[in-house]
Image (tube, rainbow, N blue to C red):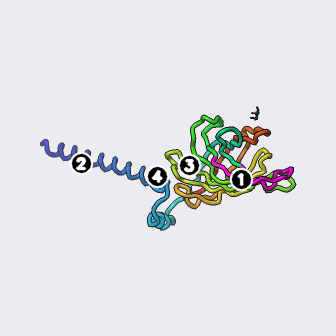
C-alpha cells in the first residue's frame, strides 16, 4: 500500500526538479543574447526569426553631458568659430541614470559623438550607441543617428539598429532638456526610448 504513495512522491519530486531546471533554462535563454554571442548562435537566432514576435520596449532615463569640471564625460575634439557653433565636435561617454540626479543609479552609457551642423540655427548631429548595464539588458546596445536641435523643447531621433536583446531594433528616442548650464554647456537630458525588436 505504501508503494503507490512513494511512487507519487518520486514523480512529484522529479516534476519539481524538471520545472526548476526549465525555469533556469528559460531565464538563461531570455538573457542569452544580451552580450555578443558566437557567430553560430547569432545564425541560429536569425533562423528562428520567422517564428518570433516583434516586441516593443520602452525605456526612460537621464543623459548627463558634462563638459566642465575635473571629470568631463564630453570632450571637445574639434573647435570652430561660428555664432551657431557650426563645426564643433564633442566625443562623449555620458552616464545614463534612472533619475535626473547625478548620483541616481546608472543604467548605461551613451558613447559616441555629436557635432554642430547648423549654419544658421543651432542643430546637432548625434551619432551614439547606448550601451545598457542593467541585468535585463546587460551589454545590449541601441544605435542612435539623428538630428538634435538641442535648444528646442522636444527632439526626436531615430534608432537605426541594435545588438543583444535589441537585435534588428528600430524606433525612436525623444529627448527633452531637464537642465542646461548655458555657461559651461553641461546638460541633463531626459530620454524616452520606444524600440521595436525581436
Ligand atoms: C553654471 O556653471 C557655472 C560655472 O561652473 C557656475 O558658476 C554656475 O553657478 C552654473 N549655473 C547653474 C545654473 O548651475
Tell me whether the residue at label 2 lies in contact with that at label 3, contact meaning CB atoms closer than 8 angstroms.
no
User: In the image, is residue 91 part of the stretch drawn in magenta?
Assistant: yes
Tag shown at residue 11: 2
Tag shown at residue 77: 1
Residue behind label 2 places its C-beta within 8 angstroms of ligand 1: no
Q: Judging from the image, what secondary structure is the residue with disc 3 in? A: strand
Closer to the camera in the image, 186 or 136:
186
4 or 3: mark nearer the eye: 3
Closer to the camera in the image, 177 or 18:
177
Mark 2 or mark 3: which comes first in sequence? 2
Q: Judging from the image, what secondary structure is the residue with disc 1 in? A: strand
> Magenta residues, as a range?
76-93
Tag shown at residue 132: 3
3 or 1: mark nearer the eye: 1
Q: Judging from the image, what secondary structure is the residue with disc 4 in? A: helix
Left or right: 162 in relation to 67:
left
Tag shown at residue 31: 4
Mark 4 or mark 2: which comes first in sequence? 2
Q: Is residue 189 visible?
A: no
Mark 1 or mark 4: which comes first in sequence? 4
Q: Is residue 122 visible?
A: yes
Distance between mark 4 and mark 3 Cα atoms: 13 Å
User: In the image, is residue 111 part of the stretch drawn in magenta?
Assistant: no
Tell me whether the residue at label 1 lies in contact with that at label 2, contact meaning CB atoms closer than 8 angstroms.
no
Q: For the image shown, how many numbered marks are present on the structure?
A: 4
User: At 73% across and 38% down in the image, what residue appears?
Assistant: 179
| Quadrant that contains the C terminus | bottom right
Amino acid at each position: 500500500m505504501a508503494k503507490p504513495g512513494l511512487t507519487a512522491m518520486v514523480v512529484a519530486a522529479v516534476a519539481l526538479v524538471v520545472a526548476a531546471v526549465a525555469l533556469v533554462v528559460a531565464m538563461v535563454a531570455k538573457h542569452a543574447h544580451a552580450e555578443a554571442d558566437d557567430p553560430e548562435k547569432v545564425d541560429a537566432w536569425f533562423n528562428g526569426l520567422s517564428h518570433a514576435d516583434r516586441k516593443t520596449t520602452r525605456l526612460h532615463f537621464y543623459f548627463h553631458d558634462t563638459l566642465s569640471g575635473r571629470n568631463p564625460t564630453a570632450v571637445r575634439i574639434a573647435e570652430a568659430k561660428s555664432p551657431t557653433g557650426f563645426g564643433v565636435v564633442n566625443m562623449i561617454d555620458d552616464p545614463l541614470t534612472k533619475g535626473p540626479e547625478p548620483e541616481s543609479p546608472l543604467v548605461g552609457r551613451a558613447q559616441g559623438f555629436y557635432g554642430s551642423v547648423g549654419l544658421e540655427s543651432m542643430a546637432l548631429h548625434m551619432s551614439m550607441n547606448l550601451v545598457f548595464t542593467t541585468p535585463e539588458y546587460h551589454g545590449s546596445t541601441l544605435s542612435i543617428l539623428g538630428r538634435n536641435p538641442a535648444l528646442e523643447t522636444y527632439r526626436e531621433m531615430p534608432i537605426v539598429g541594435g545588438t543583444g536583446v535589441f537585435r534588428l531594433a528600430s524606433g525612436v528616442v525623444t529627448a527633452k532638456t531637464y537642465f542646461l548650464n548655458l555657461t559651461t554647456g553641461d546638460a541633463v537630458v531626459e530620454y524616452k526610448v520606444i524600440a521595436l525588436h525581436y
